[in-house]
Image (cartoon, rainbow, N blue to C red):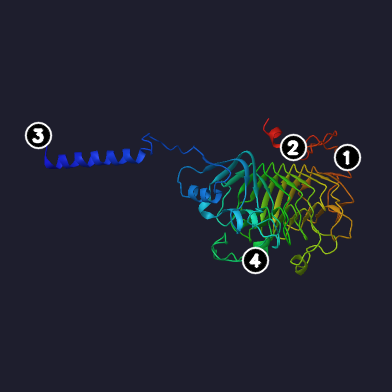
Amino acid sequence: MKTTGLQECFTKLRRSAISIILLALLGGGGCLFFSRSDEPYHVYPGDDLQALLDRVAKDPLRKHIKVHSGIYRPSRHRQALIAFTKQHDGVVLEAEGDVTLTAANPQIAREADEGYPAVVNHVVYFGDGISPKTKIRGFKITGANNHVIFSEDPKYAIQPEVAGLEKHKLFFYADGGGIKIFGRSFPTIENCVIHDNYASPCAGGVSIEHKGTRGKESVYFKDCVFRNNSCPINGAGIDMLRGSSAVIENCLFVDNKSNSKHDTRSSQVPPWRPKRGGGTLTVFPTSRVVVKKCTFTGNRNGVDDSGVDSVFEDCIFWMNNAPGGWLTAPRYELDIKDADGVQGCFLQGETIDLFGTLNPSKNVLGCPNPDFDAAYRPQASGFEKAGYRPPREQKK
């Protein structure tokens, strides 16, 4: 059959298009490669985790990263080991095995510097533009030690300027040794152990600074452990600055120490609770927290909540009377005035209910010993529905 010039032209164009597609699909070794949207990226010790985060941010399909066993350290001085900003929204970062993210790198740190061997302000940073679909799961987050870089030089800075969201000259840079959350940022943090972090003035573990942008969304913590974090003032485990929101479910707070000895920086900041001190969880005015099935024990003070409409359900507050620090007043379990949302909780300690606001018909004030096992499961009768349980048990 005779073809027209126009038909020949279309045939040549079609063949060229097919050739281009095949060349694009051919791998370097000549194998045909198809990228599936559910196929994760993989990262191993020694790889640049931030570089991969930035690469995945540009991938329209693949948003899942598996981080394999090992210790991941900063390779240079910066404000965070890893930083999630608006471009990274939707990325899921998941530990595969025993994975530690640390602020410390003694190979590049200078012993004379404050905070040695830490070389970053925060281990993990979540900045403005992060929704709940951005997740981290299964990590140990540690090593922060009050090493603070205030510079806005791009080689150090982690958060571009955002209109209407001023960076507080101290809280943005210095608070939140383990994790800093800033602006319209509502990540999901699951099955992480945030431990042995120190920050000054506040929030050795986590600092949440929504700046009044919270709306209907919240940071979500589930199945996490906050252990042995410290700071000179308040919120050694989690510090929620004004206008912030969080949901904390099935988490353990143990051996965190707010109100530690003052250092040069913290001594310039007026204390939040000058006589009785702050809690291991601090909730500032206009903030709101929902805490369910959590355990607080062995901390230097339990919770101080000056927020609005907070909820504490089925929690255990047991002997949050760790010694030391600058406190002179007796330790307390719960410091809350708006206490209508506290129910199903078990409390015992030096001062159980600081303001006498808890409803004794809805809570057990002066509860018996929960008899924790090594994993802080309560073994005593009556505590079956209260407090933290290791996350594997939650999946059964």
Of pointers 1 and 4, the one earlier in the residue sequence: 4
Q: Amino acid at mark 1?
A: Asn
Q: Amino acid at mark 3?
A: Lys
Left or right: where 386 falls relative to 208 = right
Of pointers 3 and 2, the one earlier in the residue sequence: 3
The residue that label 4 is drawn on is 168
How far from the left and from the top, in percent, is residue 64? 53, 42
The residue that label 2 is drawn on is 389
The residue that label 3 is drawn on is 2
Q: How many marks?
A: 4
Q: Residue furthest bottom?
A: 268
Of pointers 2 and 4, the one earlier in the residue sequence: 4
Q: Amino acid at mark 2?
A: Arg
Return the mark for residue 369: 1
How far from the left and from the top, in percent, is residue 297? 82, 46
Q: Secondary structure at mark 4?
A: loop
Task: Pick whichever, 383 or 231, lies toward us.
Answer: 231
Left or right: where 7 falls relative to 227 = left
Asked whether disc 3 touches disc 2, contact meaning CB atoms under 8 Å apart, the reply is no
Left or right: where 158 falls relative to 394 = left
